[in-house]
Amino acid sequence: GLSGRHSAGSRVEYYSQTAARWVPAIVLGFDENSGTYQLDIHQGADPQKVRGESLSAASDDIDRTGGGAPLFRQRPRHIAASGYAEEEQQSSSSSSAPGPRSQQLRQGDPAEYFSTTHGGWVPAVVLDFDEKRGAYILNIQPIAFPNKVRPAPEAVGAADAQEKHDADRQGPSHGSSEAGGRALPRQLQWQPCGLCKAVCFTDDLMTCGCEHRFCGPCLQKHILRLDFLRERVRCPSCTEEFGPQQ
């Protein structure tokens, strides 16, 4: 079946409506219920828009890695957050993003990303820059074109002011983060969804009062499968009922 065509961890290509071309991607899993792939750059990818990696892309990655080592093993350890992998739902303005050489922010720099989901700029941290796509890799968005990324307000200024700001934010109650050793603000804490395992902001995950948390797309899919006239909406992982506020 389709679920056996590309296994988790496989390197594939996904046809992006935004970029109007095939772009590299990695398979995170396959949703048997919806019949779609979970990719690192897109949740719920139609199998007809997913194909095996082309030979040219594979050889390019081999050249970049200095051998046959898979490129994705050298990428930052992150997974696309379901609520933020939104490039495919955006307008065609994203296709006019600057090229790969527009990189200005460095790994670990605090930044802001313009989220169409939230309708404004949201805090982020730069994990890396993808030269092939010409896009930043943020802790909240695996493909962030430079025209939607800007330095965090507190990062604008003299270097010594930034160092002082970092020292002020580094407190005994905050451990170092994977983003360059800086302590992340509380709102940047994240954890995986209980169903798709995609990493999301903790505040964006939904719960019914139990210890289980789920991202919006997974919970919506779970609820839509229920017969509302005969079934109560319960947690997908236990029997806890979702209250009216959920």
Image: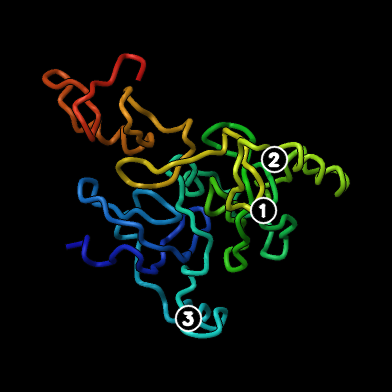
- In the rendering, which numbered label is found on residue 170? 2
Q: Quadrant of the N terminus?
A: bottom left
- In the rendering, which numbered label is found on residue 224? none
- Tell me the residue that label 3 is attached to: 56
Where, by quadrant of the figure, is residue 169 drawn? Answer: top right
Q: Is residue 225 left or right of residue 193?
A: left
Alpha carbons under labels 2 and 3: distance apart: 45 Å
Pair 2/3: label in front: 2
Q: Secondary structure at mark 3?
A: helix
Q: Is residue 245 left or right of residue 2?
A: right
Q: Amino acid at mark 3?
A: Ser
Q: Secondary structure at mark 1?
A: loop
Q: Quadrant of the C terminus?
A: top left
- Tally of numbered discs: 3
Expressed as whole percent of the image width and height from the top left, the position of residue 182 reads 66, 47
Expressed as whole percent of the image width and height from the top left, the position of residue 20 reads 50, 59
Q: How was the colour assigned to the protein in this rendering?
A: rainbow
- Tell me the residue that label 1 is attached to: 108
